[in-house]
Image (cartoon, rainbow, N blue to C red):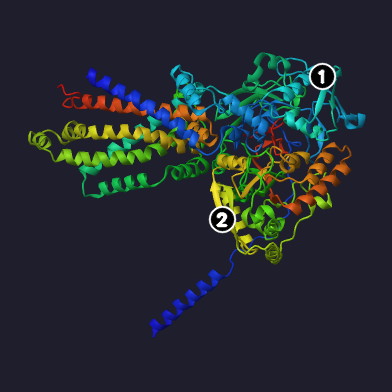
Amino acid sequence: MGRYLLNRLWQAALTMFLSSVVVFWGVRALPGDPALALAGEEADPERLAQVRADLGLDQPVLVQYWRFVTDTLSGDLGQSVRTGTPVTELIGATLPVTLWLSLFAIVVAVVIGIGAGVVAAVYRGRWPEWVANAFALVGLSVPSFWLGILAILYLSVGLGWFPASGYVPVTENPVRAAYYLFLPAVILGTALAAVVMRQTRSAMLESLSTDYVRTARAKGLSRGRVLSHYALRNSLIVVVTIIGLQLGGLISGAVVTERIFGLPGFGKLTLDSVFTRDYPVIQAVVLVVTAAYIVINLAVDVLYSLINPRIRVGGRS
Amino acid sequence: MPTRRAGAAVLACLVALVLAGCYQVQPPPERVERTDVTDAPIGDRAVRDGGDLVMGLSAEPDVLDPTTSSSLYTRYVMNTICEKLYDTDAKGEIVPQLASALPTLGDGGRTVTIPLRDGIEFADGTPFDAAAVRTTLERHLNKDDSSRASEMGPITDITTPDDRTVRLAYETPFAPITAALSDRAGMIMSPQALDRLGDDFGTAPVCVGPFKFRERVPQTSISVERDPRYYAADEVNLDTITYRIMTDANIRAANLRSGDVQVIDSVSPQDVDALDREDGVGLLQVGSFGYQGVTFNLGNVDGTGEPPGEIDTPLAQDPRVRQAFEHAIDRQALVNSVFNNWFEPACSPISPTSEFATEASDACPAYDPALSKKLLEEAGVDAPLELTMQVSNTPDTLRLAQALQAAVADGGFDLQISPVEYSTLLDVQTRGDFELLQLGWSGRVDPHGNTFAFLGSEQGNNYSGYSNPEVDALLDRAAQQTDPAQRAQTYGEVVTQVQEDDPIVYLYRQRNLTAYSEDVAGVSTYADGVVRLGRAGFLAGEG
């Protein structure tokens, strides 16, 4: 396990390096210029030159890359071109919002997705399965920006049940935070719930037809116990993998959800920084997302072995 | 027999449907005269003391530093925390704010003397005096990354004859200075805060204003709180104002309807009718001094600010081709159909509501597609002439571009539309990597700010690469003339010449549309486009 982890860490470092190259050159390959995006309609050539010099954009690209790498390694991610705020501060302020939003969305997805998946598998071929399937189809097909706008239109503007925008940190007031995060989390969680439901359903169907489930039934265990302890537990491995893989998707899904609900999260930061060509911010957010992907994948692999002790990585059992 | 009768009925229905399809079901609405509504006055209604007003802002302000800021939206926030030497009033005229009177000119316009108000202090307690004004103005002139230096003209010296007077000395007279001092150049910063924060002044700006800066959450919101030191603190009602950044027009409107925000700016002409009809929502509207138009690339080959180069196309070489394009556009129909009658046709950089408007500056080349074809023929161009226009990829702009495409087709042009994202469009515009390009300008009170940098040879915003020594001489003369009537006449001559050369075809002028919840009052917006919240308040018993 130790050697395996070491190996994975080395791969992670290589991935980080490669992604730093890709993001650095990718950002510069985008048409548009941060100095111009900053100046907007009031572009004055002398001031543009000054801004470019301040950002080091007048230096050779290799020199810029070297500065980017050394600064990043020393923990300095630079300052936002647009607002002058240190990028670490921006990420520190926005990342918790997205993490809480994602966490709420996962809870929504797990509760709805696993529940509906189990129902669909157990009542195979009957109306509960059709309802669950219809839900999954709608959840997967309807884009979250449309669902979000509908939710605002009917639940916020029409009925006034939920706020249309705004955010309260969970650490400040958990109840109000949940009130503000409810709609965005449901919207973001719906698509994931649909995926989780379909995976749970197929994994459950497979489990239900296995010998050990039949044996458990034959031994006279109650239906509930067979379902929860034998079928569902073994099905969860696939579901955990899917949730892990979808976490990255949640962050990209959060881009749209956060924009609609005006949440000051990581997704909104990403989108705004791309629109304003805020190089230091784009570079930093992509690196953070890359690091998050690597950590999540690693965590999913480790979780496997916890859920199912038969799986051992690294060859030793 | 019944079958045949049913078949005949179906056929009749089909014919009716086809005929209905051919008929123009929705003719473009007739011209509607819009009247400016600049204020939602409190009047004699009772206003509650206190409360937090939330404004949904359509774009994020850049750094809150009057010297370096270049974003229009920064002015919205600065308006409540940073008063200026002069301000624009509801009629678009310049009035004193921190100055006690309009400036007096001496030495043939070469000296500008500004008297200051007494008994005012900054939000940090520093007294507001002539030395403080000089410190700010010198920072505008000397800071490396200042966006204000060019707005302030050829200043040679700033002196303070006494505690309440500032005098600017000029190399040559510079008439636009009063207008500049009614915008960001006139925002006076606390010298003590400047000493303390230096280049970081924008992170915690301190000025004179009804409110003072409290907090900024980047990309999300900016909040300001009531300043007890403000000289007219008794006129201020709210405790705090939160500017929440909401870039999507639909989301802004939804938040206004749900009561999460009370004021929103830049309402889309597509939404405004529905919002206006709604109970509890009020609308402010005022024509802007800016314009939207199509810029032709006549010589911008090395980027703006560089000497123009040679572009060997009939469009760049022959003004008749550009005039043909202009004559092919029915501006009124365009504005009516694309913007539901909310915007106004524009034919020049000078708004007809400006005090510098003249008959010459209001003149408009007629809509005449037959003339367009004739001009193209005279220029020896085979119609249809294929042109590519780059536009921003927003829905409103794309609708405009498509309407324009259809309009100029009758005049002998095959207009291709190339949509690009806004930041890219700015880049393309500056580098000169375009044939035609649709963008506009938010506008300034003084015509100098709407003409000089765009039409003067090798100027910073001359994206067209246009160069006409006659226009350069007129623009220089206008900037130096101190008599408004003479200036207006000179700008009229500029417009006449520019319409002849057509580096830019001016299309329409936006109206600044601001919606507010009717449980608040005291909100206003003037021709400079800035939404003013300094005196706003919640009506008693509501909100």
Q: Earlier in the sequence, mark 2 or mark 1?
A: 1
Figure check: A163 above or below B405: above
Q: Residue at x 38, y 81 (%)?
A: B3
Task: Name the amino acid type tagged 1.
Answer: Ala
Are the residues flagged by discs 2 and 1 from a single subunit?
Answer: yes
Q: Residue furthest bottom?
A: B1
Quarter of image, res B29:
bottom right
Figure check: B317 above or below B221: below
Element assignment for label 2: strand
| Residue pointed to by mark 1 | B130
Q: Chain of mark 2?
A: B
Q: Chain of mark 1?
A: B
Please state the total of marks drawn on the protein image.
2
Classify 10 Å Cα crowding around label 1: few (below 14), some (14-19), many (20 and above): many
Q: Depth check: give the residue in front, A99 or A179.
A: A99
Distance CA(mark 2)–CA(mark 1): 56 Å
Q: Depth check: give the residue in front, B104 or B227.
A: B104
Q: State the mark number for residue A177.
A: none
Quarter of image, res B178:
top right
Task: Name the amino acid type tagged 2.
Answer: Gln
- Observer able to see residue B80: yes
Residue B141 appears at what percent x and percent y? 74, 25
Figure check: B20 above or below A24: below
Q: State the mark number for residue B416.
A: 2
In this rendering, position of residue A304 left or right of residue B435: left
Q: Depth check: give the residue in front, B243 or B297.
A: B297
Q: Which quadrant, please, contains the N terminus of chain A?
A: top left
Element assignment for label 1: helix
Residue B230 appears at what percent x and percent y? 74, 21
Q: Nearer the viewer, mark 2 or mark 1?
A: 2
